Amino acid sequence: MENRGSRAIAVIALCVAIVGVTLGFAAFSNVLNIQPSASVAPDASTFNVDFSSSDSALETNLVVPVKVPEELVASSASINNVGDPTISNLSVSFTEPGQSATYTFYTYNAGEYDAYLKSITFANAASGDSFKVCTSEGSADDGLVAAACEDISVSVTVGSLEEATSSQASITGHSLAKGAYEEVVVKIEYAADGAVADGNFDVDFGDITLTYSSVD
């Protein structure tokens, strides 16, 4: 009886030992996940091209035109960079052919990116369906007014680009570096060999828009 009881205890002890070895070599695992994510939302206000009356500092003084002849009556232009930058009040009163008023000011890249001039747009005048609309006053002959109207023009020159007298789309390769200035010249002219009307008339021009982008 003793031997049988001893064998039973030995078997039980062996089983415990095997279980103990099994437990001793058991492995556990735990999975840790890393899920990276990022979003980028650039501040649109960091792209900013303004008008300036100076080529060395951002200034909004009146832009006084160069007049031919000097006694020609022409208004000084005003710069407003609040909202969409605008230069306004470019106005001249011609009395005969051969006269002109030339306004010189600057674009200034005040943003954090290089700016690329993409287009120059000559919009229709508010009073008609073309950039230039001439309206006779009093008894001025419409035919003579129309002929003289053809000889009055507005041109804009931006930096090294050729003079533009109509819309220029798809401009490429024309950059304005951060912190840089570029000259803009607007000339209102009555051609020297222009036709003459027999009375007063008004000339209404549309807006000229320079469009810049952060990519070429």
Image (spheres, helix red, strand yellow):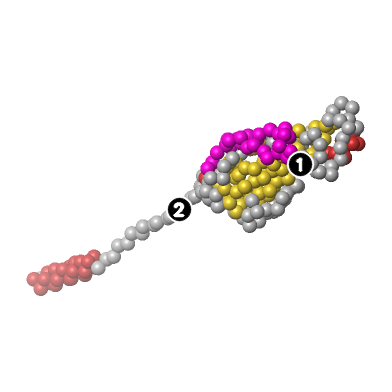
Q: Give the left or right position of residue 43, taking residue 206 as reference.
A: left
How far across and how far down the image is residue 15, in percent?
Answer: 20, 69
Name which residue lies at 83% across and 30% down.
Answer: 200
Q: Is residue 157 visible to us here?
A: yes
SS under mark 2: loop
Q: Main secondary structure of the magenta part?
A: loop
How far across and how far down the image is residue 88, in percent?
Answer: 66, 35
Which comes before the other along the chain, label 1 or label 2?
A: 2
Question: Which region shows up in magenta?
Answer: 57-83
Of badges 1 and 2, the one in the foreground is: 1
Q: CA distance from mark 1 to mark 2?
A: 59 Å
- Give yes or no for contact between labels 1 and 2 (Cβ–Cβ under 8 Å): no
How far across and how far down the image is residue 8, in percent?
Answer: 15, 69
Per the image, is 79 magenta?
A: yes
Q: Residues within 10 Å of mark 1 (few under 14, many from 20)?
A: many
Q: Nearer the viewer, residue 171 or 21?
A: 171
From the image, tell me which residue sits under label 2: 37
Q: Nearer the viewer, residue 33 or 189?
A: 189
Q: Quadrant location of residue 26? A: bottom left
Query: Quadrant of the image for the C terminus?
Result: bottom right
Residue type, numbered disc 2: Ser
From the image, tell me which residue sits under label 1: 189
Q: Quadrant location of residue 203? A: top right
Q: Nearer the viewer, residue 105 or 81?
A: 105
Q: From this viewpoint, which residue is outermost toward the top?
A: 138
Residue 170 to residue 54: above or below: below
Name which residue lies at 64% across and 46% down.
Answer: 184
